[in-house]
Amino acid sequence: MKRRIICNEDFCIGCRLCEVHCNVKHSKSRDIILAYKYEKEKEPSRMTFEQKEQVCGSIVCMNCKDPLCIKACSMGAIKIEDGTVIIDTDRCVGCWMCVMVCPFGAIKRGDKKAFKCDHCHDEEVPICVLNCPNKALMYEAD
Amino acid sequence: MSSVIPEFIVDKNEDRCIKCKVCVRQCSEEVFKYFEEFDLIRIYNDKCVGCHRCEMMCPTDALTITKNNALYKENFHWSSYTINSIKKQAETGGMILTGSGNDKAYVSYWDRMLLDASQVTNPPIDPLREPMELRTYLGKKPDRITLKEENGEVSLETKLSPQIKLETPIMFSAMSYGSISLNACESLASAASKLGTFYNTGEGGLHKKLYKYGKNTIGQIASGRFGVDTDYLDTCAAIEIKIGQGAKPGIGGHLPGEKVTVEISETRMIPSGTDAISPAPHHDIYSIEDLKQLISLIKEATNYEKPVFVKIAAVHNSAAIASGIVRAGADVIVIDGFRGGTGAAPSVIRDNTGIPIEVALAVIDQRLRDESIRNEVSIVAAGGIRSSADAVKAMALGADAVYIATAALIAMGCTLCQKCYKGKCNWGLTTQDPVLTRRLNPELGSQRLTNLVNSWNLEIKEILGSMGINAIEALRGNRLRLRGVGLTELESKILGIEHAGM
Amino acid sequence: MKYVIIGNGAAAIGAIEGIRSNDKKSEIVLLSKENCISYSKPQLYKMLNEENVQNIYYRNEEFYTTNNVSTILGKTLISVDFNKKILLLEDDTIKYDKLLIATGAKANVPKLKGFDGETYSFTNIDEALKLKESLVNKDKIAVLGGGLIGVKLSEYLHKMGKEVILIVSSKGVLSSLGDEKISQILNNEIIEKGVNLLLSTKIVGAKKIDSKIELKLEKENIICEAIVSCKGVKPEVSPFEKTELSIDQGIKVDDHMKTNIDDVFAAGDVTEMYNSIEDGYCNIPILPNAYGGGYCAGINMSGGDAKIDSVYPMNSLQIFDVQMITMGLLSSAEKDEVITMFDSKKRIYRKLVIREGKLIGAALLGDIDRAGILNNIIKCNLDVSAIKEELLNSKINFYVLPRNMREVIVKSYIEGIK
């Protein structure tokens, strides 16, 4: 199954709550106030909010059909599982070849490891889509 | 220095604030400003209009908007609102503008009327077990009908006037593209089409994108004649001539040039950037005879296939005017009460002009009955219908259907901050700013409107069931099922209802 | 159908995965000179201070069995009879139906005049282990060559506590990139961190004196204990030299990874391919090209139809504390427009090379986040005239592209590019 999170920029209101909820989901406590105010370890959001003048939207890993990151990974640490592109953090050495090729800039640099949207594979609907107040983020699975 | 004291206080709980800055990004009034250097969200209370967008968007509930209770020393005669209005006028020399409907503490007759219910002698009906009919037809009904029988099949011989079919007696009232955003228009149009009812274009013309909802569109023709051409007449299912509006009887409309975007100018068929001014009167209508001419003209232009509505504001002599409108050939009369909303109106007019819809409706229905012309017209009540109960009471008072607009806006996000005229609506409703209009996804807007009307439908069926009625038709004008509470004898008489206990 | 793959690097692995995406059953034989399962060449440096070779494996150990591949490791290919479709080994022959040549590249080790001792190189695991062993009791190492391997190796040796002399013939390290500013920043970084960097220095010869080596340079002589030559790599084409296979710098392949001989494909560092930016055939020995080329070859070998994306050089590297990504052409021609941005405080450098409105090269130093967006602009040959300043000066942002372009890009990647 292929999972995709697509942003309809006609309706993105630029609130950036997708980033907030993504951060909470990937925090230790999964509690918004604890995650933001008390937890020490913080990663940048997996979601990237983009804005140019009046146009805005959020972008994450698109689960490309033929992902360039898999081809570029020097450690063979990226693979497709069940249609979702997954980075094996045990194997990742932070060479950033994936950052170099991802056409959406969706792969982020963490502490010596690359990370990206995991499409909340433990949830039925990704948390950002669920919390998008204007349904600008759409979730497609096929 | 402004001498106007802030009306609202924005309180941020620092223990809960995670500095996600959603408030900074969402407030179009710029109440919040983030200073990166100090990692501080600075709040400017004086800019707050009390729309509560920030409160609703804040993911940690860190924000609370409260009324500035001690705005001025309490004074029964000189309210804080009055004092602030005087100060504003002293500062600017202009009229005080406002949006939405009259918010003053006039009596609401809906709240002084109670519905009857069946007990023992006339059993109630369970709407979950038995069919309930909400379908309504709007249009002129014949004095009598003749049937013919051919080969055992019975059919109608009388030729009926054009009718529109409503699957629910609730329609969306006139709001123009210009006063509200295209996304809001599309939400209304799409919801009307899903619900099998109608929405009204206001005097904003019909955007090309909305032509596909033509079967559920009532096209308005008002004093500015904006956006009217043959395509418009052909596409809309019915045509409404707007004489007046409940929120501002006797006052025209004014869409400032900066709101007349390219798309609005194309839809209204006026140059972009110019003010769209609807005169207070129709300059070709100064009498019932003139009105009759326009009605005939529209009927001729639409091949006598579409019902023609005439909308008036509820004013002192509404009943006599209504009689004239029927005689001028209208198929439907719309009466808009003084609680009806507006995108912009002088406060002094909105708050002091017109009469309650309940009263106007009752007297018009009575007058038309007395003149034996009630069947020649359908009556639509508009202006401040807040709930299914109000709608049912309106129908018992004589309405065929009701129009809702403020309730529809609230369903789409509006919090009645009454700042529609500023064009900075934080909910993307009464604005043309592309950053703000995006805030209403028509898919969501349409869904919420559909939900609202569907839930009212359920409630109406429940009410009808409790009265032992199984069709909305059987309720119309059935004032016996209403009782007044706390009404004077005169009020009861005007409303045509008995007091509770009678 | 019997597929034979010569080599065991990224291209070979790509080919296996490409073939298996189409053909789950047929026999695959993999022949490799190295007696070791596939490992990541860019991570070879780790072998100097890591005990466990598993840490740089490119795929896990079960990869070959899961993909039903029989391996012949540690055997050298002598030659190929392309007419009879037979590979000749020292003591065996192998028949093939479809052949992939992915022999990679080998170190270019120049002869030093008057030197009969060992000159180490560093391009594969055997060389790495040999070097590691010899380093145990040596402290002063001369590294020849300021290319990527030389610089990275110097960094690692330095981190191991060795005294490193990096001898570079040009004016700066990584001069082949064609960007003086980058060379200059890296020169400073390397010197600052304590590597003895000798620039514009040619080696005249060398002499062994007991356990030490005297390295003769043009102006001076220096003493060291070991020499590692990092003077680049060249395609490993020796088994095919006397055959009809078309070879220039490397084995010439088309955009379907086919060679001039039927049923013979080649991929990876051994090939030369058409580079649209340079408008000529080039050998581009980088991992993404190797894997991508191998995968494409694998699909075509097994009856599919895949075309390789346009190829051009690109790399992501970290030298001491400097993080950088380069792509495309950085050495500009006269007709090109070059725009640069340098923030000395934040140590951020960005350079864009634009030809006829199109981006053809980019370098990002310091801030490399979202570099792929630029890379895709190069790849898709998009016109950047209107947005070049923004690309240069702001954080890289997908939304700098106009909406219609973005929609095309999203669609093409979601649906797969053909």
Image (cartoon, rainbow, N blue to C red):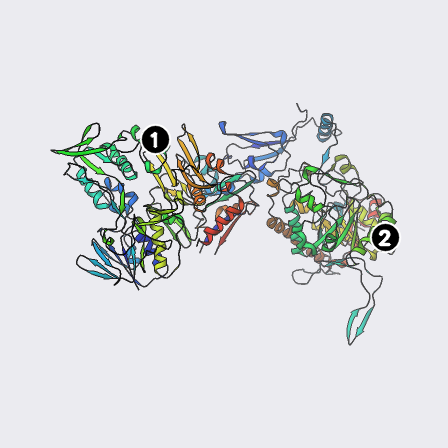
Amino acid type shown at disc 1: Gln
| Residue in view at x 65 percent, y 41 percent | B432
Mark 1 chain: C
User: Which residue is nearer to you in this view: B59 or B494?
Assistant: B59
Distance, label 2 to label 1, CA atoms, is 90 Å
Q: Nearer the viewer, mark 2 or mark 1?
A: 1
Establish if B258 lies above or below A134.
Answer: above
* Residue A125 appears in the rendering: no
Report the residue that reaches farthest toward the top.
B1
Q: Which residue is mark 1?
A: C184
Q: Which residue is mark 2?
A: B328
Q: Is residue B359 left or right of residue B183?
A: right
User: Which residue is nearer to you in this view: C260 or B160?
Assistant: C260
| Disc 1 residue crowd, few under 14, some 14–19, many 20+, Cα 10 Å | some
Q: Position of residue B369 (x, y in %)?
A: 85, 54
User: Which residue is nearer to you in this view: C30 or B107?
Assistant: C30
| Disc 2 residue crowd, few under 14, some 14–19, many 20+, Cα 10 Å | some
Q: Is residue B485 left or right of residue C172?
A: right
Mark 2 chain: B
Q: Position of residue B60 (x, y in %)?
A: 52, 38
Q: Is residue B218 left or right of residue C171?
A: right
